[in-house]
């Protein structure tokens, strides 16, 4: 009895699967429309996308102050994770003495073993914007 039920279910499943293969063009288009992706990702230089990819250099660069307020302020205003507070001349003195290239590298690439992550977590910031933010913090901490 159970084997007849199982066999009937298998036959029914095979019949339904076979029927799904024989879709009309209209039915197939309707299915494709229902499962169509919500959007697509286009990378710069990818010519297979629907339109030209946005070039990063076409965007207007944010000022150092804007980047600081958007990404750096959280740690550099409170001293979180050992970050030197902007305006604390003593906390910045040794760092500034190492040179701006060292500070720029720390801003762009982070400092291993500390709370300073690459770009301060601002992954949509360009390197130049991060450098401008470093300049802003140094100028306000001398």
Image: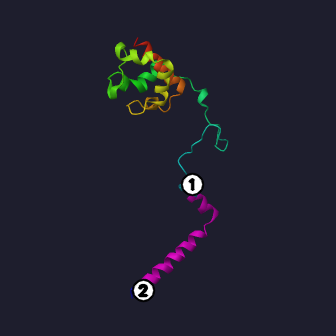
Q: Identify the residue at image location x=48%, y=79%.
A: 10
Q: Is residue 74 left or right of residue 14?
A: left
- Please give the range of residues in magenta: 4-31
Q: Position of residue 40 (x, y in %)?
A: 57, 45
Q: Which secondary structure, mark 1? A: helix
Is 122 rendered above or below residue 88? Answer: below
Relative to 59, does residue 52 appear above or below in the rendering? below
Q: Residue at x 58, y 57 (%)?
A: 32
- Spot occupied by residue 74 in the image (x, y as percentages of width and height): 36, 26
Name the residue that disc number 1 marks.
33
- Viewed as shown, does residue 72 lie left or right of 17? left
Magenta stretch, overall SS? helix
Residue labelled with disc 2: 3
Where 20 sits versus 66, above or below? below
On-image quarter of the N terminus: bottom left
Q: What residue appears at the point 42 percent right and 27 percent down from the top-left corner?
A: 71
Left or right of 75, for residue 13: right
Q: Residue furthest right?
A: 47
Give SS at disc 2.
Answer: helix
Q: Work out whether residue 120 can be spotted.
A: yes
Q: Nearer the viewer, residue 41 or 32?
A: 41
């Amino acid at each position: 009895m159970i084997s007849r039920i199982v066999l009937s279910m298998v036959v029914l499943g095979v019949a339904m699967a076979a029927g799904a293969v024989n879709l009309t063009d209209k039915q197939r288009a309707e299915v494709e429309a229902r499962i169509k992706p919500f959007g697509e990702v286009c990378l710069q230089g990818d010519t297979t996308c629907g339109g030209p990819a946005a070039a990063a250099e076409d965007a207007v660069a944010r000022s150092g102050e804007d980047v600081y307020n958007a990404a750096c302020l959280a740690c550099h205003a409170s001293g979180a994770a050992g970050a030197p507070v902007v305006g604390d001349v003593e906390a910045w003195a040794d760092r500034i003495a190492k040179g701006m290239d060292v500070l720029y590298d720390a801003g762009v690439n982070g400092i291993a073993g500390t709370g300073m992550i690459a770009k301060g977590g601002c992954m949509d910031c360009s390197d130049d914007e991060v450098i401008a933010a470093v300049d802003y913090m140094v100028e306000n901490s001398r």
